[in-house]
Image (cartoon, helix red, strand yellow):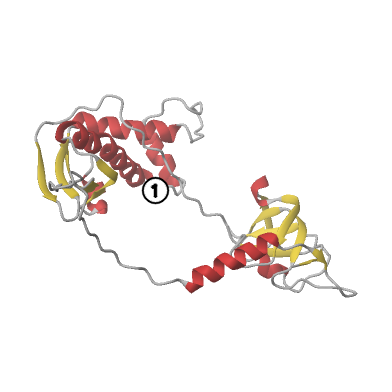
Amino acid sequence: MRFAPVALTLALLSPLSSSFFLPHPPLQNPTFLPAKTIVSKDPSTSSVQITITATEAQTKEAYDRVITDASKTLEIPGFRKGSKIPANVVESVMEKGGRGGKEFLKKQALKTLIASVVEPALKDEEGLDPIGEPRLIQNEDILVQMFTPDEEIQLEVKCDVWPEVAWKATDSGKAYDGLEASYTRKPFNQAKMDEALKDLKDRQASLAPKSGDSPSLEMNDACVVNMVGFLAKEDGSKGEPLPNAASGDQVDIIMETGKYMAGLVEGLVGEKERTLATRVTM
């Protein structure tokens, strides 16, 4: 791998798009509704399908918890960060901020509800040991539309459980004697092998100055850059500066696509030691 120093002091970025996630910890005091139905147990797939009705108190508590978590991440004029903010204010701020608004909050509340109501019901009342997280059988988008805090909602989920093994008595006293099993051998994946070998080679590679009187950057080269990020205006000119996450001094760049912000490596191809501007997308 070759090395060529390049100084990059200005990067014009396309407008940022971001995702917003909220945690959904279990509710503090979930109350289980006794009326629930195990629809089916399928031993062949070691799975269980269950229908359970969440109470008005549970739906309200789930939504309140999500509102509280969202309040801790928002800065709203007139409210201290982390203080209790009315649900309609949080919904409005998130809607205007492009974070999904009430629909997103309801989706998060459903996740909280499943974790806090369905899983304990399976374990405590049915004696089942779920593997992984329960999966909704219903259409999630329709369920989000139906979800209303302070109202009951019926959830239909499916989850994997540990299989039940029936042992047979044997003369040796060892129940596993004579058992046979079959499996399907997966074909060898040459592409993954080649990728792993390339990764090992890259990690063990040593850098050396690039030869030539005025070397320019090519793919698979390495370089060191100083960069400062700005939002790009509609006319392409420099806008507001971005946080430090999009800037830095003495940043090592390996000239390979897919490793950095889209457009960064492509904008450096053919460049020499100088100051330049390139458009990238985050």
Q: Quadrant of the N terminus?
A: bottom right
Q: Is residue 45 visible?
A: yes
Above or below, 261 against 124 in this view is below
For the residue marked with disc 1, what is the amino acid?
Answer: Gly
Task: Provide residue 85's location: percent of width, then percent of height.
Answer: 41, 29
Q: Does the image show residue 149?
A: no
Mark 1: secondary structure: loop
In the rendered image, residue 195, in percent from the top left (x then y), is placed at 55, 68
- Side of 169 where 194 appears, left or right: right
**Furthest-front residue in view?**
172
Left or right, residue 43 beside residue 182: left
Say left or right for 257 vs 126: right
Identified at 24% across, 37% down, the residue is 119
Question: Which residue is pictured at 34% across the width and 68% down the height?
Answer: 185
Q: For this rendering, which residue is in front, 215 or 128?
A: 128
Disc 1 designates what residue?
Answer: 100
**Of the pair 212 and 109, the residue shown nearer to us:** 212
Q: Is residue 87 left or right of residue 231?
A: left
* Towards the viewer: 159 or 157: 159
Where 166 falls versus 117 (above or below)? below
Along the viewing direction, whichever of 208 and 234 lies nearer the viewer: 208
Q: Residue at x 63, y 66 (%)?
A: 263
How would you rate the neighbour count of disc 1 (Cα within 10 Å): few for under 14, some for 14-19, many for 20 or more? some
Quadrant in which residue 215 is drawn: bottom right
Residue 109 image position (x, y, % from top left) = 31, 39
Q: Residue 221 occupies which quadrant of the picture?
A: bottom right
